[in-house]
Image: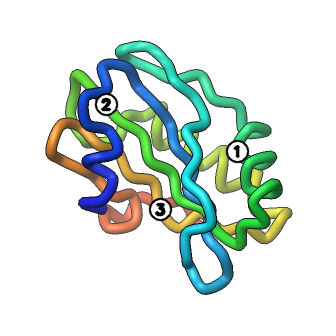
Amino acid sequence: MADAIPLMAGRADEVFYVVALDAACRVLNATLLVEGTVTEVQLHPRQVVEMALRNRASSVMFIHNHPAGTARPSTDDLRLTETLVKALQPLSIKVLDHIVVAGDQAYSFARGNVMPEN
């Protein structure tokens, strides 16, 4: 989780990364999927599905930032994560975690027990 903090250093706008992992949970690729504004990113589930399939991922993790806020996930973050889990389920691609970074703080959905079941 601490590795996610430098990834977001100096970013003034929200960004959303998808990390593709193989069956042994080794990183295949980390892709900056979208860049947004100071307060939000616009992401379509199709973008995540395409990236995961293109990289032949067995599982994925999401990382995004809150440049001007707290690392606690917003209601929109929780809703988006649930939508992405549901989009990847039929493809047998598990979502292992979603990490939100704010400054030098990071929040893990998995550790916070708020990851949707998948």
Residue type, label 3: Asp
What kind of element bears circle 3?
strand
Marks 3 and 1, the one that precedes in the sequence: 1
Residue 57 position within the rendered picture, expressed as x and y whole percent measured from the top left: 72, 66
* Front one among 25 and 71: 25
Residue type at the position of mark 2: His
Q: Residue furthest top?
A: 37
**Residue placed at 40% from the left, 66% from the top?**
110
Q: Is residue 52 among the parts visible in the rendering?
A: yes
In this orientation, which residue lies closer to the viewer: 28 or 63? 28
Quadrant hosting residue 7: top left
Q: Point out the image quarter for the C terminus.
A: bottom right
**Residue denoted by label 2:** 66
Characterize the local packing of mark 1: few (<14), some (14-19) or many (20 or more) Cα atoms within 10 angstroms: many
Near mark 2 (Cα within 10 A), the count class, few <14, some 14-19 or many ≥20, is many
Q: Could you tell me how far apart the alpha carbons at marks 3 and 1 are, in whole angstroms? A: 14 Å
Which residue corresponds to the image point at 44% horizontal and 47% vertical from the top-left? 63
Q: Which mark is residue 97?
A: 3
Res 118 visible: no
| Residue under the point 50% across and 37% down | 16
Asked if 62 appears above or below 32 in the picture, the reply is: below
Disc 1 marks which amino acid? Answer: Val
Note whether 48 is above or below 3 in the view shown.
Answer: above
Work out whether 47 lies above or below 29: above
- Residue 96, percent from left and from top: 53, 67
Query: Which element carries disc 1, helix, strand or loop?
Result: helix
Residue under label 1, please give it.
48
